[in-house]
């Protein structure tokens, strides 16, 4: 069994959520999720002793999960003609394999609170990687079917998965994020792209809606009027275009399909895709 040393700065509340993650994550509130994700970020520097070698949690995940599973997972996604329909089953199959692998020798994770935290860390970051890849490929294919000209990075090329942006169009850089959590960590991880294609939870209708979060200069490239709102209420304002301030950033939030229409209009007027 491995020996784990957790990050000293973890709070008791964070440890409690980490130990609840495997069985109760679907019942977490937004506040609990923010606390939990802060904990998962902090755990990257926690350590695990394995066969006379000490690894950080991040290095452990990279070596035994990402390096082993990610290329095959991405290849299966690209082979599917209907990614939204088939991807959840593919993701679940890999998650079961990873769970079984980590609970067996030589790791036997989950038998102590500390090793359960490492197990939760690995399963969370795998789920995050899988959901993000599924959403990204879904968006790429949807934009292609719409007729939008853009240059995507290639998820099948490992080095390109870590590129500064996921796509370029109209001489602007864009990223694709499965949720708006990236905005909550913007103080630690500054936002550098012109726009972000993501999903926002609509509390009133209890569903996610696709949106695009743009800098004000990026929105001005495709034009339009805005209404003011905070981030939490933005979904209720759609399909109006929303202007908001979050942390120190000024953003414009646009419903995804409206954004596509605006981009197509600009491209039909003669603005071409950016070539790196």
Image: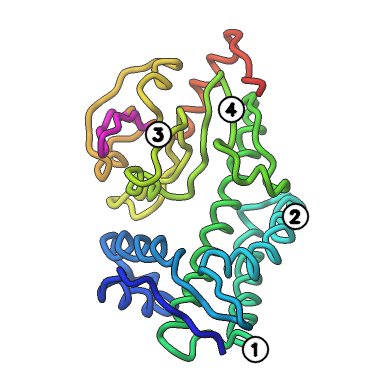
Which circle's residue, 2 or 1, is located before the other in the chain? 2
The secondary structure type at the circle numbered 2 is: helix
Q: Nearer the viewer, residue 6 or 77?
A: 6
Residue bearing the label numbered 1? 105
Picture layout, residue 41 above or below residue 111: above
Distance of label 2 from label 1 (alpha carbons): 28 Å
The secondary structure type at the circle numbered 3 is: strand
Q: Residue at x 40, y 47 (%)?
A: 182
Q: Residue at x 32, y 43 (%)?
A: 187
Distance of label 3 from label 4 (alpha carbons): 15 Å
| Magenta span main SS | strand
Q: Position of residue 263 (x, y in %)?
A: 52, 21
Magenta stretch bounds: 242-253
Does residue 35 appear left or right of residue 3 in this picture?
Answer: left
Residue bearing the label numbered 4? 168
Residue bearing the label numbered 2? 75
Q: Position of residue 27 (x, y in %)?
A: 34, 71
Which circle's residue, 1 or 4, is located before the other in the chain? 1
Q: Nearer the viewer, residue 136 or 172?
A: 172
Q: Residue at x 55, y 71 (%)?
A: 55
Q: Are marks 1 and 4 in contact (CB under 8 Å)?
A: no
Which circle's residue, 3 or 2, is located before the other in the chain? 2
Eye-nearest disc, 3 or 4: 4
Q: Are marks 3 and 1 in contact (CB under 8 Å)?
A: no
Q: Residue at x 37, y 61 (%)?
A: 37
Eye-nearest disc, 1 or 4: 1
Which circle's residue, 3 or 4, is located before the other in the chain? 4
Distance of label 3 from label 1 (alpha carbons): 45 Å
Picture layout, residue 100 above or below residue 243: below
Q: Are marks 3 and 2 in contact (CB under 8 Å)?
A: no
Does residue 241 appear left or right of residue 176 in this picture?
Answer: left
């Amino acid at each position: 069994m491995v020996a784990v040393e957790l990050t000293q700065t973890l709070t008791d509340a964070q440890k409690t959520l980490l130990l609840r993650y495997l069985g109760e994550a679907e019942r977490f509130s937004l506040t609990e999720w923010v606390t939990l994700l802060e904990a998962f970020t902090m755990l990257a520097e926690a350590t695990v002793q394995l066969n006379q070698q000490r690894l950080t949690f991040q290095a452990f995940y990279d070596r035994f999960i990402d390096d082993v599973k990610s290329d095959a997972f991405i290849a299966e996604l690209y082979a599917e003609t209907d990614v939204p329909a088939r991807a959840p089953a593919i993701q679940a199959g890999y998650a079961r394999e990873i769970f079984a692998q980590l609970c067996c020798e030589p790791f036997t994770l989950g038998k102590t609170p500390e090793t359960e935290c490492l197990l939760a860390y690995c399963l969370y970051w795998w789920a995050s990687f899988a959901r993000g890849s599924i959403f990204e490929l879904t968006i790429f294919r949807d934009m292609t079917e719409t007729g939008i000209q853009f240059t995507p990075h290639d998820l099948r090329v490992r080095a390109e998965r870590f590129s500064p942006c996921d796509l370029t169009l109209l001489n602007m850089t864009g990223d694709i994020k499965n949720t708006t959590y990236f905005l909550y960590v913007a103080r630690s991880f500054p936002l550098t792209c012109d726009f972000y294609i993501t999903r926002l939870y609509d509390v009133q209708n209890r569903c996610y809606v696709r949106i695009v979060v743009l800098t004000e200069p990026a929105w001005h490239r495709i034009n339009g009027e805005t209404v003011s709102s905070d981030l939490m209420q933005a979904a209720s304002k759609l399909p109006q275009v929303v202007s908001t301030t979050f942390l120190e950033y000024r953003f414009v939030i646009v419903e995804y399909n409206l954004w596509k229409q605006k981009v197509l209009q600009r491209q039909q007027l003669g603005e071409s895709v950016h070539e790196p």
